[in-house]
Amino acid sequence: MADRRIQVFYTVAKQLSFTKAAELLFMTQPAVTFQVKQLEEHFNTRLFERTHGRILLTPAGELALEYAERILSLGAEMETRVGELTGQISGPLMIGASTTIAEYMLPRMLGEFKALYPQVQAHLTVANSETIETKVSDHTLDIGLIEASSHHPNLITEVCCDDELVVICAPDHEFARAPCVTPIQLAEQPYVSREVGSGTREVVDDYFREAGVSPDDLNIVMEMGSREAIKGAVEAGLGIAIISSSTVLKELKLGDLVAVPLKPRLIRPLSLVYPQEKFRSKLLQAFLDFLAGTALFRNKAEEIEAMRT
């Protein structure tokens, strides 16, 4: 509803990057630059200072950002409230989820929600936790489900469930019959890690630090952004890894991998993040209420232990 130039300017101003704004808006960088230039010509003033590969808001840009936030917020509220006069919960719901949640936990939930509210069009974006937080903060997404605590002060964070992480190794690895493994034992092994920015990577790094092991001292042989690639590397005997227990049940049943509990156990919260705003649409509130009444994740510890004995 709002002028497209304002939406583009707002995203660039929040990111202080034309490249990142283009990625978030699914536009080309020249198109983003053109929209901002059009707005600057409209106001007959520069909104950004461009120096040494960086951009900064000018005083006029800072003022424009304040008004852009209010305009976009009011525009979204107007569209939602007018639509809600019909009494139906309908329209697009922009959801973001980190890969563990998106691939292994959320599809069934979205199916159940769609059955309750057939007029809703759910759009799912899959990315690492850091990217999801950024998109929710920039209002590109309505809500995010992430694997780590939020670092954005303007987002509300609610823990929705717990997820236990375990060590995985090949069946012929020395850890395969161990009752548990410690962080110090892990530091001596070739290790396959998630990429920086991943919620799993952040949680695991913090776990090692709390145990007195620096993440820099790990023998990292590979960093991967794909959970399936990590499982494949471990299955091939290239190293061990730490992964969500909910993501390896198939491999455990087939005997391709072995899951070993950590000592102490590593249990992380999975969280919802959404903007701190006075107005919340009926659609978003309905989805939050639905998640609150649904077991998004159930503990797999007993099932995994049964496969190991």
Image (cartoon, grey):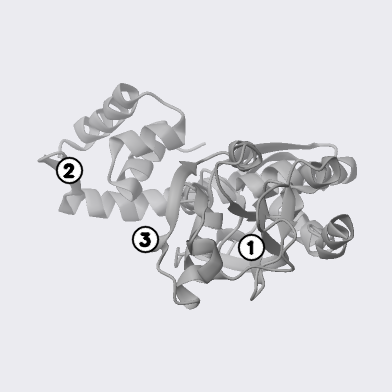
- Per the image, label 2 sits on a secondary structure element best described as strand
Q: In this view, does 189 lie to the left or right of 279?
A: left
- Per the image, label 1 sits on a secondary structure element best described as strand
Whole-Å distance between the Cαs marked 3 and 2? 30 Å
Q: Residues within 10 Å of mark 2 (few under 14, many from 20)?
A: few
Q: Residues within 10 Å of mark 1 (few under 14, many from 20)?
A: many
Question: What residue do we see at 38% from left, 62% from top?
Answer: 217
Q: Name the residue under label 3.
A: 216
Q: How crowded is mark 3: few (under 14 residues within 10 Å), some or many (20 or more)?
A: few
> Which label was assigned to residue 54?
2
In the rendered image, residue 1, in percent from the top left (x then y), is placed at 52, 36
Whole-Å distance between the Cαs marked 1 and 3? 27 Å
Disc 3 marks which amino acid?
Asp
Q: Which of 137 and 281 is in front in this view?
A: 137
Disc 2 marks which amino acid?
Arg
Labels 1 and 3 touching (C-beta < 8 A): no
Q: Mark 1 points at which residue?
A: 271
Disc 1 marks which amino acid?
Ser
